[in-house]
Image (spheres, rainbow, N blue to C red):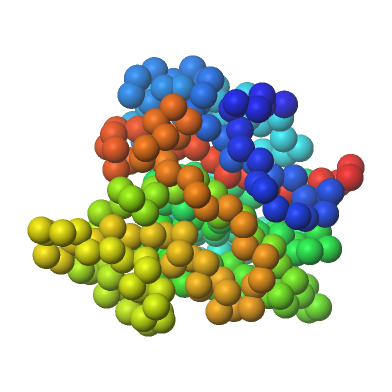
Amino acid sequence: MISANKKISPNWVVPQSIQAFCSTRVGGVSKPPFNGFNLGLNAGDDPADVMQNRAFLRSTLPSEPIWLKQIHGVSVSTPALRQSFGAGPFEADASVTNIPNEVLAVLTADCMPVLFASKVGDVIGAAHAGWRGLSSGVLESTVQAMCDLSSSLSPQDISVWMGPAIGPTVFEVGEDVLQAFSGQSQTTLSNAFRPIIGRPGKYLADLYSLARERLSSLGILQIEGGGFCTFTDQGRFFSYRRDKSTGRFASLIWISKDS
């Protein structure tokens, strides 16, 4: 397994069959500026190094992760779509499954990874939620796709963990980002977008707060995680905003067939 300093386990209450963790940048063979455990093939790193890192990750998992071609959208990869699509990364920003030992994965380096699990442990999901995907409804699409896999599942029966993302004290955005979330409550907008003094039209944005309200509005009650900051925690996390040329870490979840 990956040692404790090289991974983060979600602090949520789910059945024993649900296995999940988030990798960090600690370890691996990637060279600066991608050092060390970079799992992103499209970040500019040496592909051979990335594949060596991925091979080590695979050795700790029950199957090869379902890697996505992430485009900051709302499409969801489902078992049926994967079967019809065939080999190769599926163009989507979330995935769901009800198949044991299928490993869902999202890659991030400031955007928010969000993991989902039904409370009985039979359906899971993973979403890549940057501000574009979050404002467009990637979390809602993931929940809907999970419910489509189980006729008895409702949002109230889903637990969520929000993984490491850029934190609210450093995520500077413009008016366009604020407007993208204009449909959310005024209270949430006031809390999630703090004007930067002396810089009109500039704000510090709180992705965790924005996601929490959207999830709550669906009826999801158990929402854990948040409190990370990829930008300031350079020892553990890659950050595109901080470094530009940087790697990607993975958030992974699966239903263990052996549990």
**Position of residue 171 in the picture relative to residue 100 (left or right):** left
Q: Quadrant of residue 174?
A: bottom left
**Position of residue 125 in the picture relative to residue 170 (left or right):** right
Q: Quadrant of residue 258?
A: top right
**Position of residue 111 in the picture relative to residue 79 (left or right):** left
Q: Is residue 114 above or below residue 109?
A: below
Residue 153 shows in this picture: yes
Q: Residue furthest right?
A: 258
Q: Quadrant of residue 217?
A: bottom right
Image x and y of residue 187, in percent: 39, 78
Q: Say which residue appears at 75% left-offset and 55% top-offset.
A: 13
Q: Say which residue appears at 61% left-offset and 37% top-offset.
A: 8
Image x and y of residue 204, in percent: 28, 58
Q: Quadrant of the N terminus?
A: top right
Q: Say which residue appears at 84% left-offset and 48% top-offset.
A: 16
**Position of residue 245 in the picture relative to residue 23 (left or right):** left
- Image mark count: 0
Image x and y of residue 202, in percent: 18, 61
Q: Quadrant of the C terminus?
A: top right
Image x and y of residue 72, in percent: 40, 59
Residue 71 shows in this picture: no
Q: Is residue 138 above or below residue 185?
A: above
Q: Say which residue appears at 35% left-offset and 73% top-offset.
A: 189
Q: Is residue 161 above or below residue 57?
A: below
- Return the residue nearer the eye: 47 or 124: 124
